[in-house]
Amino acid sequence: MIKHINMEKSKRILWSLLLLLALPGMFMLSGCKKFLDRKPLTATLDDLHQGGIEGQVFGIYSAVKDYDIGQVFGGIPWQAIHNFRSDDSQKGSEPSDGAEWVAPFDNFQYVKDLWATNFYWDAHYSLIHLTNTAIQTADSLHLTGVESEVNIAEARFFRAFSYFDMVRTFGDVPKIDFRIYNAAQANIAKSPAAQIYALIDADLQYASANLPLVWGSQYPGRLTSGAAKALWAKTYMFRSNWSAALGLLNQVINSGQYSLYSSYFGIFKDAGENCSESILEWQNYVGPNKTDDHGSWYGTCQGVRAANSTGWNLGWGWNTPTDAFVSSFEAGDPRLPSTVLFSGQSDDPATGGYGATLPAYPAVLPQKYWNKKVYADPAMRQSTGYLDGAYWINQRVIRYADVLLMAAECLNETNAGAQAATLLNQVRARVSMPSIGFIDQAQMRAAIKKERRAELGLEGERFFDLVRWNDAVGVLGPLGYVDKNKLYPIPQPAIDRSNGVLVQNPAY
């Protein structure tokens, strides 16, 4: 397992991995966290007959957030695709650190051959390979019963999750919904996006029907039917299928399993992990003095960056807020100081700080703002022994506030704006912001968009929201965005490996 390494070393390791890949998806990872340490992540056929495919499925959980494949589900490549391309954040760090990322991700000068997007493509297919292997194993062994159905549902959820990333990032992509035994089997042409969405729908329908509503306390972070329905609704919203999305979101809301956490900034603290608002959350853990390390790069890659001598070298400093994001908040909205750390100012204990004052920009710190949602507790840094990282921070993937705002949007788009206002105001009431009354659909639509930006800032939603709203050209145009930038070009190494079977996206 790759542990604490610097950026240049990580690049060399990732490039080496890519060169060794004969096809996407053929390397495996191991690791565990919380419920993942209950049994080995590999199993014999006897084990599989006895206990289903649980070991393989736990390996998928581990891979999606671990130090290798997990890079593209929360690390820097994920930040680039999901966050840097929005108007809310930018590459960050020091100007010389990863300078080659500015043009493609901050300025929309997309590059066909860049390690981040190459790895994003390959690692998603690696995860898809893990899911296909688990599903095929269950089928070949004729596994039946509730436990096996749950395991299959978990694998199908992760396959849908991976393909949703791929289809909204690249458009048409190869549909590999079968187990791969040799490289030739994986070398297939792209399928239309509609076929990818059909697979996503089938997988999430199965997951919604077969995952439990809730797990016991021994399984924090394990997939539930609520997570499957929330993700499924998100995929429908990307296709503007408001009625289908609303039906699923209402099931999540009416399940009684979720509620808004009382403190907004508290959601992102260690004590807020897996709180009442958590619907989907990648689990990370580091024990005392760097023992039992089952963390990820999610928190570390975004921590405040500075020289070690300052005492403020908390991470790598990527994904930093923009002036546009800071100025977008309503006056008095506590989500601004709960989301953004300001160089040269107090970290504000009233909104999640620890009573420290940050050094000044640009004298000491290379950026004006930092992501406070991954601001590491000094006590945890001392306890874990990671003074310059935050590997233990869970990644909040889908929150109940997101579900409420998605439902509000669906209601408004189906001519139920007054009901939409009720859900919108639930989110606003949590942070003591004044209620917004319904006037007309256009006014409520604008209010919901603004609320999503404030509530979900720096959590990977903004760019894809702008794309699905058809607002990206108007909002991101001044940064260099044009309509073709809604899709990223297929990585050139993948095309080269295919010997012409894969065809580049038309606009590129």
Image: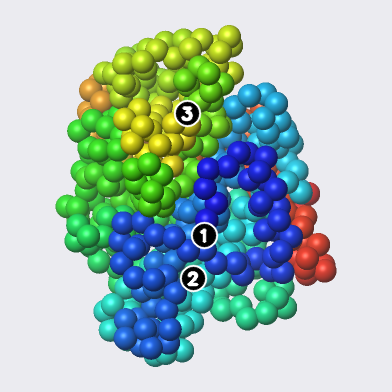
User: Tag 3: residue type?
Assistant: Leu
Q: Position of residue 12 (x, y in %)?
A: 70, 48
How packed is label 2: few (under 14 Cα within 10 Å), some, or many (20 or more)?
Answer: many
Frontmost of labels 2 and 1 is 2
Say left or right for 298 vs 142: right
Q: Residue at x 36, y 74 (%)?
A: 54
User: Tag 2: residue type?
Assistant: Thr
Residue 305 position by quadrant:
top right
Where is 263 relative to 254, above or below?
above
Where is 352 relative to 220, above or below?
above
Say left or right for 213 vs 118: left
Where is 202 relative to 215, above or below?
below
Between discs 3 and 1, the one toward the N terminus:
1
Q: Position of residue 436 (x, y in %)?
A: 28, 25
User: Tag 1: residue type?
Assistant: Ser
Q: Position of residue 76 (x, y in %)?
A: 57, 41
SS class, disc 3: loop
Between discs 2 and 1, the one toward the N terminus:
2
Q: Which residue is mark 1?
A: 162
Q: Residue at x 23, y 30 (%)?
A: 263
Where is 4 relative to 338, above or below?
below
Q: Which residue is mark 2?
A: 131
SS class, disc 1: helix
Q: Residue at x 55, y 32 (%)?
A: 316
Q: Which residue is mark 3?
A: 314
